Amino acid sequence: MKTLICKTARNLLVKSAVASLAATLSLDAIAQPTPADVEELVEYAQCIRANGYAEFPDPGPDGRMMVRITDPVAGERFRAAQGACTDKLPSQMAAMNAPMTPERLEGLVKFAECVRAAGLSDFPDPTPQGAFELSNPSFDLRAPQTQQTMSTCREANAVTGLMIRRVPQ
């Protein structure tokens, strides 16, 4: 099954995530979004819905949302809606679509090392594009220990967003 989960939409890496529908994506912000950040996300969500992906949610007051894409047809509709809404892309999301820099990749490698050192030994290094590809199906991104570890490691390594994909074994 192809699944895409987007969490903490303030720092989504949507274009890259949807390009690989066999993915689980978790993107988390370090800082709490401002009301203006949330308003940008609401406008983006409205645009996505108006352009063919009606099930796209509004973010919560904390800037969080979850999107699941479970089939290729939905993925195509989502990609088309994204293309129509590039002018509404929130600034934090647009920054995540920028080319990978050596500095950002180094921060992601340090993040992965931190996660493993905290006891999540199955966590991989990032790909050259900055994605973390999980091959262990039992790795639970929603577990409280995993969330706490990732939050601590993000803060320690100044990582502003994460793309985590489930890859078939």
Image (cartoon, rainbow, N blue to C red):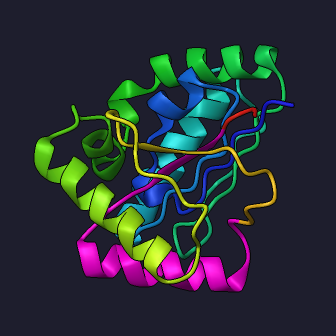
Q: How many marks?
A: 0
Q: Quadrant of the C terminus?
A: top right
Residue 89 % position (x, y):
38, 38
Where residue 13 sits in the image (x, y, percent)?
44, 42
Q: Is residue 5 above or below residue 30?
A: above
Instruction: Name the quadrant containing residue 86.
Output: top left
**Residue at 68% over, 48% down:** 5
Quick one: which residue is furthest to the right in this view?
1
Q: Is residue 43 magenta?
A: no
Q: Position of residue 133 (x, y in %)?
A: 56, 42
Segment tinted magenta in the rendering: 141-166
- 1 left or right of 5? right
Q: Residue at x 22, y 37 (%)?
A: 100
**Would you place residue 40 above or below residue 154 in this image?**
above
* Observer able to see residue 23: yes
Camera-nearest residue between 145 and 13: 145
Note whether residue 30 is visible. no
* Left-right relation of 48 to 44: right
Q: Position of residue 116 (x, y in %)?
A: 48, 72
Q: Quadrant of the N terminus?
A: top right
**Of the pair 139 and 163, the residue shown nearer to us:** 139
What residue is rendered at 76% in x and 42% in y? Answer: 68
Q: Residue at x 41, y 55 (%)?
A: 11
- Magenta-drawn stretch contains 148: yes
Q: Is residue 164 above or below residue 48?
A: below
